[in-house]
Amino acid sequence: MIKIGLIGCGFMGSMHANSYNIIDGVQVTAVADIRRDKAEELAKISGAEIYSTGMELIANADVDAIDICLPTFLHTEHAIAAMKKVKNVFIEKPVAFTPAECDALLKAQEETGAGVQVGQVVRFWDEYVCLKDAIDTGKYGKVINAVFRRLSPRPTWTWENWDLELTRSRGAMLDLHVHDTDYMLHVFGRPNNFNTVISHGGEGNSYTMTIANYDGFVVTSEGTWDLPASFPFEMAFRVTFEKAVMEYTNQGFTLYTDEAATPIKLNKREIAVQGGGNISDLGGYFNELEYFANCLIAGKKPDKATLPDACASVKFIFEEMEKAGNAIL
Ligand SMILES: NC(=O)c1ccc[n+]([C@@H]2O[C@H](COP(=O)([O-])OP(=O)(O)OC[C@H]3O[C@@H](n4cnc5c(N)ncnc54)[C@H](O)[C@@H]3O)[C@@H](O)[C@H]2O)c1
């Protein structure tokens, strides 16, 4: 049994604990949170021991791998300490808070040889995996244009509201938009050129739009959390190929051709999750952690959503912020 130490028992820590709980061969045996009640809630799931800070867990817990679900501004110091302690580390996205922190993480990985996977979960989300396959195989012809969209109500659920403070999260740009930036770089590579705008109408950089030029096509991505609590979260794309359009929205996943609009059926697994729901409710979160767990079990370093990948995405976000003339660099 591979023993996992989970640091940060908030929103994402709970998603991770529920995922590990239904993955064979791994067990969360230690959890840490400065909020005792949050740590206790997750400790109950798998009978884990409790630590009161992330650093205390890293120093003392007998674990094989460490998973960091802390607020972004705390990732780097914990991730470097974790890399020195265990062979494999999972770090939530965005992997770090600044390009300099990215370089420090890369240096630590080189020095320790630790395996690192980052929670760039869209790379593991079934619909986005299916889209990448269509792009790579060219089965619908070449890409003509692509649009990505990520809309969220304001995140008012985090510890001390850290996510809403630019000095602790860098706002929607680094926190939310990084998903689509990372996916864009993953499937299309770096664009020839791009431009980014930020709307200053809302709070901080809470609305952003990037237009990226590739050879022969344009990719647009919009991200905002300038939306009221009742607004449904949506991640979406519409990719126009020569022979078809693939669209994913809250309404469904559809392939459009001149002949028909056909719902795309994916083979989603149905395994019950503690507290209700099933694996498909955990979506890419389950898929990415199952991949991480299988690497640990096989004694391999993860080679998807790697540290260099995630650092490239954070650095690209900083380029986007600079293009947008943002003052929070
Ligand atoms: N992959 C995704 O789609 C996704 C979605 C949401 C959040 N995230 C990422 O996950 C990370 C955590 O976000 P969240 O929404 O879970 O935040 P959160 O505020 O809900 O959880 C963070 C937890 O860390 C705890 N904490 C703070 N300092 C600590 C310390 N020193 N030691 C131990 N615990 C400490 C807090 O008490 C809190 O419970 C962030 O990097 C965020 O960007 C990723």
Image (cartoon, rainbow, N blue to C red):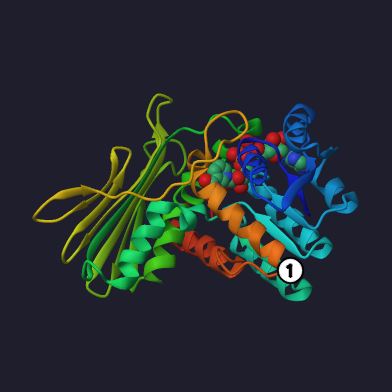
Residue at point 43% right, 25% down?
229
Task: Decide: is 297 above or below 225.
Answer: below
Residue at point 57% right, 39% down?
163
Query: Horizontal and vertical percent for residue 205?
Result: 44, 44
Query: Horizontal and vertical percent for residue 47?
Result: 80, 36
User: Can residue 1 be seen from the camera position used here?
Assistant: yes
Towards the viewer: 77 or 286: 286
Quadrant location of the N terminus in the rendered image: bottom right
Which residue lies under the disc numbered 1? 114
| Outermost residue toward the top in this view | 230
Left or right: 56 in relation to 277:
right
| Outermost residue toward the left in this view | 258
Query: Horizontal and vertical percent for residue 24?
Result: 67, 51
Q: Amino acid at mark 1?
A: Ala
Left or right: 171 in relation to 240:
right
Query: Horizontal and vertical percent for residue 135?
Result: 31, 67
